[in-house]
Image (cartoon, rainbow, N blue to C red):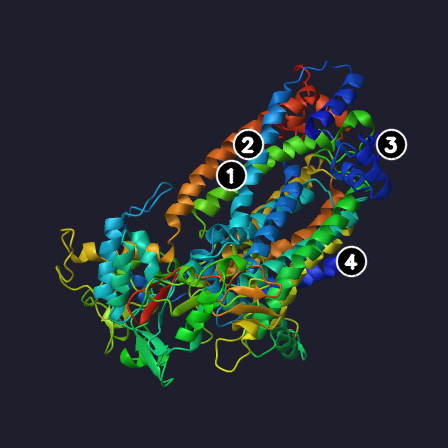
Amino acid sequence: MSFPWAAHYAPKSVFTQWIDERLPLPRLVYNAVGAGYPVPRNLNYFWNFGVLAGAALGLQIITGIILAMHYAANGAIAFDSVEHIMRDVNSGWLLRYAHANGASFFFIVVYMHIGRGLYYGSYKAPREMIWLLGVVIFLLMMATAFMGYVLPWGQMSFWGAQVITGFFSAIPLVGEPIREWLLGGYAPDNAALNRFFSLHYLLPFVIAGVIILHIWALHIPGSNNPTGVDVKGPQDTVPFHPYYTAKDGFGLGVFLIAFSLFVFFMPNALGHPDNYIPANPLSTPAHIVPEWYFLPFYAILKSFTVNFLWIPAKLWGVMAMFGSILLLFVLPWLDTSPVRSSNYRPLYKWFFFALIIDVLVLGWLGQAPAEEPYVRLSQFCAAYYFAHFLIILPIVSKIERPKPLPMSISASVLHGEAQESAPFGAGGVATVPARAS
Amino acid sequence: MANVEVVDQAGVTEKVEGVGVRRRDWLNIAAVSVAGVGGLTVLIPLINQMNPSADVLALASIEVDISKITPGMGIKTSWRKQPVFIRNLTPKEIAEANAVDVSSLRDPATLAERTKPGKENWLITLAVCTHLGCVPLGVTEGENRGSYGGYFCPCHGSSYDTAARIRSGPAPLNLNVPEYKFNSDTVVQIG
Amino acid sequence: MVRIIAFLAGLVFVMALVVAMLIPRQPAVENTAHHFHVEPQEVAFASDGAFGRFDRQQLQRGFQVYKEVCAACHSLRHVAFRDLTELGFTAPEVKAIAKNWAIEVPSVNPDTGEPATRKAIPSDMFPSPYANEVAARAANNNALPPDLSLMTKAREGHAEYVHGLLTGYRKAPADLPAEARPGPGLYYNPVYANLNIAMPPPLVAEGQVSYADGTKPTVDQMAQDVSAFLIWTAEPKLENRKRTGVAVILFLLLATTLAYFAYQNIWADKKAKPLPQA
């Protein structure tokens, strides 16, 4: 275990001892998310989103396996089988709405989780591997979500498949053959639908596997914390169970309330009406947009409108869109500042908030029509996105003079953590509750 | 309980820090119990979804025209996706069925109990062997009817007589008689 | 090294975007359809809101409008006759409705194997008025009457859009440019996205349908009733969903409150006691 003062698992009965000697699974759980994992005592509510992301994946896997019992991956009847689930299968409407909105909520919590990592420098040494695995999970999630959206075989499903596989045709020379290989045809049809279903079923289990690696890697250095200061001793930590299991239980309740409001009272608010029209290869909907969680990347794709340096605009767009995610892989080496938490980085903090606003605006621009002033605005925002990570961040790391760090986590706690750990910093503007006190 | 135990353990850490133990444990127990009740309730739809769906239940009854089935003939039809035998028994077959000593049967029942009054010649049974669910032979002329002139299951050799009662072989029960009624002399409604 | 490569890559991406931003654009032309488009008016339905329930009388009236007006051209392929029991019809009534439905269900002649039709039974879906899309287009001046099962979920504006469209037919305004005027077989309806729709006005006169419950069959009333009916066809489990939702939210509020106090309870001894402000 990471810290010498971590509690050790002691079997409480003859039976658990018998198990422990043969398959130490209870011990593994105890050390991973039990009392045997010491966690910094000053984590704020932004640290709830990792567990919530795990819960969202579990929800998606359970509802997904059940939906697969009733869904038919065949172009002729896929749409009807979804309606069959909605109308005739016992509680089918609940399962389908939970799965469709579950995808959105999975992305909401993962975006919060990523944002927390960015603000508190959780990607920095010695936690680079956790971050890299996280980016892999994010990529797998995007692939899974895209393929899942194709399965109802409505108009948005079909044209989403057409447009996204169209990205690959931007690759010079081999692009078109790759696209045909992906689709198993010249346009999305039965072959594509079936392979998307197969992979959509498979990938969540791959994600679960990478999450295990993600958590394993987390347990080597232990969790980061709002000060970004390393754990110095037992006074800085509390056991994960019961302290953070209790906090995560409360967080899960809040998450489920928000989730249920969508599932039961506005289940289609995050979807698109056109996906209730069966796929029609002969007619494109007037206004095609991806699901909301892809909109910022879609805006980046759309913002490249001119050929530049002998490379066509289409290829620029596709490279930029993939690049905008892949650049996260090198983030730990772009940010050279030794200070993790932005609470102590007066300059970087403002660029961080600029990035959050930038991404939100990109998301809004992603669904805007391709006309002025939206196009120029999205070009500006896309430019900031790349500049932020690739140009500004390394420079800021060099020139910034960080504020003095607290001596230790427990010292920071004694000074009033609400001020130290809130994202709006130590200036006394503690608008975000750090932890209920 | 596990929760409470570990709370105690946390209490140990705490004593090290010199703070007294004063905890309202009922709150933790209540929270965990309510969450448990919620979790169990969620299981209901997750399990119930495997029950037959509304469209399957809607197919629960069918009407069959039996005007073209002459004595000695039988047909196989489908009800709830299960095969059903409808057989028009000849007087000889009825006599054979009635001649059997009911108390000697593995699953005692008379032909009259297995048909409708006044329609003793119409034997309507599920075509599902009560052993392991194969479809017995014998409804069509020329098929193996086994040693008792009724139906013969080729899977494990169960023989049924002309009232579709089990006479030999591993099957435990007579062929099941579904719920049915005669809407007219020529139309029977099953289910 | 990583940072140098990243810097150069970032520079190239930013330059590609800056070049794109600097290129002059055509000013956006005003879209005629946009200019004349009319948003559907707001309509209150009994099923709206967290506690919304269907008005079964209204659904039955809406079903009557569908049956007597819409069903001649529009299918309802995801809805079965048996579902009508949810509108308050009894099982024998549903059986009679199915049996007397104007369109028969395709089947096969049991003696010859030729295609044939038979009377509908409760377990059948509503039969389509046309054998296939080609037949539907041929009968409708090359326009395809869409299936109505999911209509209120498949259009921006939902049931209000359906009501707005049914009551939105107008005379084309005098200042409408010639290219936006309805051509042959088209009708001016500013609620429809491109202003001209191939569907002739379906609800034209008061009393087109005579309601058994004594409701006055104005055009607006008929349009509201059929829209309410189409909310039900698109989401027959709506009441079930909202009722379950209220129970789930109440339960979660209780559970979360308990979880909060349990969390506070467990953390009670770890709470920081901030030093008094100097």
Residues under labels 4 and 1: Cα distance? 47 Å
> Which of the chains bears the disc numbered 3?
A
Q: Is disc 1 in contact with disc 2, using a CB cutoff of under 8 Å?
A: yes
Q: Which residue is mark 3?
A: A4
Residues under labels 2 and 4: Cα distance? 50 Å
Earlier residue among tags 1 and 3: 3
Quadrant that contains the N terminus of chain C: bottom right
Q: Nearer the viewer, mark 2 or mark 3?
A: 2
- The amino acid beneath tag 1 is Ile
- The amino acid beneath tag 2 is Thr
Number of marks drawn: 4
Residue B145 visible in this rendered orientation of the protein:
yes
Residue A279 visible in this rendered orientation of the protein:
no
Q: Which residue is mark 2?
A: C256
**Which disc is residue C4 wearing?**
4
The secondary element bearing badge 4 is classed as: helix
Q: Is disc 2 in contact with disc 4, using a CB cutoff of under 8 Å?
A: no
- The amino acid beneath tag 4 is Ile
Q: Are marks 4 and 1 on the same chain?
A: no
> Which of the chains bears the disc numbered 4?
C
Q: Nearer the viewer, residue A238 or A253?
A: A253
- x%, y% of residue B15? 78, 17
- x%, y% of residue A254? 55, 36
Name the residue: 57% across, 79% down.
A186
- The amino acid beneath tag 3 is Pro
